[in-house]
């Protein structure tokens, strides 16, 4: 197959959607080496993706747009690149399929099947998590892309239910394709003493949460939960790009008398993150909603015991390898943290279950199911042309 991937969204800090692209491409190429991939990227695409071992097998098409900054009308320009330039370039290259990996795919591509992955509908339920222009834009382009696509990929059964219930998509058109985790390859971790000194973690236990600092991640309750713990040596580490919500979290911690217990180091290197996963007493994800919850698998793969919300896709991903709490209850959240820190036998049991759980989610499986979706999309397009 000749496959075009819409990666115009991809920047260095794309988080889980960036991991999706970086893992899906080489996995598809390993499964079916004859696949020809054209990747459409923006002008600020991260340099490391072009240096990846598999990058030479991909045709990279760089579009003259930026997505992380720009004038007020920049969103319209990036959309024009995806709904006008990508279709023209795809048709010229006689691609078989165009796949948008992050909610947006071309509406019309002559002679080409269209697939879109709708990662989640968080922007619909929690519009305050994005800039107003971006939220309005997503409400227009994501459902429109999905309705125009020949097939839609959801990354969890929970996400599929949302697509059916909230934007009235035909469930027969949606394929559920879980994301994956690589358990055999990790960066060399930064030594724990270095991390503790640099991030001011002290000698006590610390709770790690890797999540965008946005309101739907429910981090304010996590701050309250950690502040309520009797042990003042427990730290809460929230790495990741700063946001306006981060300042609110810092102010909250200060008001609770726990300003020194909250650490927000900003974006950290892969080596630092590897070391933090391994050194953390537990990993906690308190989100109200997740399309999948990839950080759960990332923590489990390193043997970090996990606690998370009992809603959305999180139980689907974590199974019996996590402690669960009501995301609306900081008391339940604090109790789960207290158990993981204080009961090391329980922590060890969850650590072992987490590693076993990860074996169910592989990028090879993601790639195989994605390639199957491409073939379904091609068949659907062929059938529609007959009638």
Image (tube, helix red, strand yellow):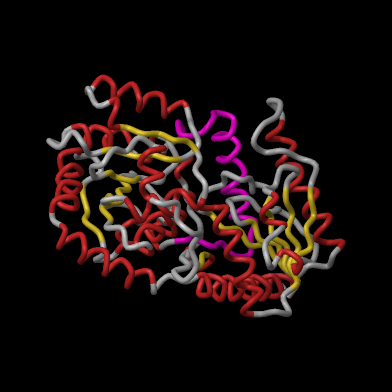
Q: In this view, does 1 lie above or below 14?
A: below
Q: Nearer the viewer, residue 273 or 10?
A: 273
The x, y position of residue 265, in whole percent, is: 44, 35
The x, y position of residue 269, in whole percent, is: 52, 47
Q: Which of 21 and 81 is in front in this view?
A: 21
Residue at position x 55%, y 59% in the image: 20
Relative horizontal placement of residue 349, taking residue 111 as reference (left or right): left
Q: Nearer the viewer, residue 74 or 136?
A: 74
The x, y position of residue 365, in whole percent, is: 50, 74
Counting the numbered discs, the total is 0
Residue at position x 28%, y 32% in the image: 261
The x, y position of residue 52, in whole percent, is: 67, 62
Question: Which residue is farthest right?
Answer: 92
Q: Nearer the viewer, residue 144 or 211?
A: 211
**Which residues are drawn in magenta?**
127-155
Residue at position x 34%, y 45% in the image: 287
Relative horizontal placement of residue 11, taking residue 352 as reference (left or right): right
Q: In this view, does 98 lie above or below 255?
A: below
Instruction: Look at the image and tell me in which quarter the N terminus lies.
Output: bottom right
| Chief secondary structure of the magenta portion | helix
Q: In this view, does 185 lie above or below 118?
A: below
């Amino acid at each position: 197959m000749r496959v075009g991937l819409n990666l115009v969204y991809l920047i260095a800090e794309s988080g889980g959607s960036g991991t999706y692209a970086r893992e899906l491409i080489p996995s598809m190429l390993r499964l079916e080496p004859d696949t020809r991939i054209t990747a459409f990227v923006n002008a600020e695409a991260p340099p490391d993706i072009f240096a990846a071992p598999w990058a030479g097998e991909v045709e990279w098409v760089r579009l003259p747009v930026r997505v992380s900054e720009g004038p007020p009308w920049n969103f319209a320009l990036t959309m024009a690149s995806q709904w006008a330039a990508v279709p023209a370039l795809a048709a010229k290259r006689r691609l078989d399929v165009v796949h948008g990996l992050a909610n947006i795919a071309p509406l019309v591509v002559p002679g080409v099947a269209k697939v879109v992955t709708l990662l989640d509908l968080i922007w619909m339920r929690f519009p305050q998590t994005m800039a107003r222009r971006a939220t309005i834009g997503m409400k227009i382009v994501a459902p429109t892309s999905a309705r125009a696509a020949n097939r839609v990929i959801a990354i969890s059964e929970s996400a599929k239910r949302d697509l059916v219930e909230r934007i009235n998509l035909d469930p027969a058109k949606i394929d559920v394709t879980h994301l994956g985790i690589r358990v055999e390859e990790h960066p060399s971790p930064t030594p724990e003493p270095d991390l503790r000194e640099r991030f001011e973690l002290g000698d006590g236990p610390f709770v790690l949460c890797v999540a965008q600092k946005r309101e739907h991640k429910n981090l304010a309750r996590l701050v309250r939960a950690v502040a309520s713990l009797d042990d003042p040596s427990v730290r809460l580490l929230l790495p990741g790009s700063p946001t306006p919500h981060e300042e609110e979290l810092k102010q909250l911690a200060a008001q609770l008398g726990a300003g020194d217990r909250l650490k927000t180091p900003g974006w950290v290197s892969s080596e630092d993150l590897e070391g933090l996963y391994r050194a953390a007493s537990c990993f906690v994800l308190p989100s109200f909603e997740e399309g999948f919850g990839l950080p759960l698998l990332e923590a489990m793969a390193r043997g970090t015991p996990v606690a998370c919300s009992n809603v959305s896709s999180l139980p689907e991903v974590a199974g019996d390898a996590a402690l669960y709490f009501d995301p609306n209850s900081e008391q339940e959240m604090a109790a789960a943290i207290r158990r993981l820190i204080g009961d090391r036998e329980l922590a060890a049991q969850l650590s072992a279950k987490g590693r076993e759980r990860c074996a169910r989610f592989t990028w090879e499986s993601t790639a195989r199911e994605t390639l199957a979706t491409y073939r379904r999309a091609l068949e659907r397009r062929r059938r529609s042309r007959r009638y």
